[in-house]
Image (cartoon, rainbow, N blue to C red):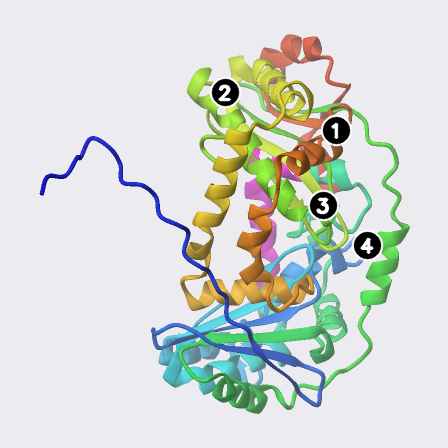
Amino acid sequence: MSVDRTELPPIGPDPLFTFPRPVKHTLANGLTIWAVEHGAMPVVSACLLLHCGSASDPENHGGLGSLTAALLDEGSGSRSALEVQEALRQIGARFNRHVTADATQLRMTSLSRFTGQALTLLAELGTCPTFDEEQFTRVKQLRLDQLVQSRDVPSANANRIMVEALYGDHPYGHNPSGTEASIQTLTRDHVVDFHREFYQPVKATLILVGAMPAEQLLDQAATAFQKWCATSDTRTADLDTRCEAYSEGTQRERLIVMNRPGAAQSELRIGHRGVSRDTPDYHALRVLNMILGGQFVSRLNLNLREDKGYTYGVSTGFTFCRYAGDFMAALSVQTNATSESIREVLKEIGHIRDSQPVSDEELVQAKAALTRGYPRGFETASQVVQGFANSALYQLPDDYFTQVVPSVNLVDLETVRRVAQEYLVPDQLTTVVVGDRDAIATGLTDLHAGELIEIKHEDLISN
């Protein structure tokens, strides 16, 4: 039997993707636990999801939530910082934390046979930190050093300028890590008060995924966390009020420049405010983004990288948070191509919105890219935990992840063209450039991309 190797074999039907459903239980203290038996590897991944992120930072105390999380393993219960690390080492567990605008995640991964010990340690780190004064001083100084170092990172400067420009005085409008000025003002008492206020069982979800029965996971979690008691009411209502009271105002075209004399490249960000995670157009916007700048064969990447060679890569993305969101394009280009790169990005946004709308072929390819690679995002226990963390945070239905592929496949041409016109607004785009002002000034002026604003390094340090 001969085989024709000159043609690729036909692609078969997509396999059915199903996502496990969690077994849920709420302890007497109000802590909700989700447990899932998943995978063959003898590993358990846990996530203590706290509904407090950088948006919960008090005004003028940016970075407080992040600094609080950074101090959790610097001493807890009766253990010193070194003893905490030794306890982790003895069971081969890994602890880390991640703070976003909407939430704080405390993650612990261990072998299945050490699940009880790992959960006990996670409970201790999350609920009984000592916030030792000496460790506080050291970690605070480390954060300040990191912020000083970030002054010389163009991408970090561009991201921060863009976020502050888009959100202003909204709780999302500050750097989650804080600024040099805000971190300088923080004391140990601020950290203790933040932890007491926001690290509450009633506003937390513990997610467990691993190769053991869900009921067994629930039992071990209950043993570890049953002594966690609420200490006060949380300020979620206050955050709701702050976000609702925020006035978006009228967005306008702006061109914001930070000068980096002699820079060989310009760091660019182009975007405007978007929508929150609960938008009914979530999947349609993801499809649109894939076509515009969400994959290697996107319109923007084929134009600026493959055709013109201005950049190694350009990407776009819609950020969907609890209270708000944004759309942003990000790229780094050679200095002499700065203005032309901006022009091409603006052109492609205009084209996909109006003169060159999404085609049938682009729609099919984008949906295939989203759906066929989707199951790879849930191969490990840690990936499944992250999925459920998003589900708990944004109150998604239990079958959400099973329904993602069918939902993406239901996006039609009319819908993706509609969201392009509705959610891409060229006359509201803010453009941020971090680069050599003298080398690019003339080209930027010729763009007529809105009011020209110059930002200095000192502005980032003091805000």
Mark 2 or 1, nearer chain start:
2
User: Is 425 placed above or below 308 here?
Assistant: below
Mark 4 or 1, nearer chain start:
4
Q: SS class of the residue under badge 2?
A: helix
Mark 2 or 3, nearer chain start:
2
User: Is 46 placed above or below 278 here?
Assistant: below
In the picture of the structure, the residue carrying the numbered disc 2 is 303
Label 2 to label 1, Cα distance in Å? 21 Å
User: Is 222 placed above or below 388 here?
Assistant: below
Label 4 to label 1, Cα distance in Å? 30 Å
- Say whether marks 2 and 3 touch (CB < 8 Å): no
**Dot 3 amino acid type:** Gly
Q: Which mark is residue 325?
A: 3
The residue shown at (35%, 48%) is 12
**Dot 1 amino acid type:** Val
Span of residues in magenta: 138-161
Q: In which quarter of the image is the N terminus?
A: top left
Horizontal and vertical percent position of residue 332? 52, 27
In the picture of the structure, the residue carrying the numbered disc 4 is 59
Foreground: disc 4 or disc 1:
1
Q: Is residue 197 magenta?
A: no
Circle 1 packing at 10 Å, graded few (<14), some (14-19), many (20+), is: many
Mark 3 or 4, nearer chain start:
4
Foreground: disc 4 or disc 2:
2
Mark 4 or 2, nearer chain start:
4
Q: Residue 425 carries which label?
A: 1
Foreground: disc 3 or disc 4:
3
Main secondary structure found in the magenta portion: helix
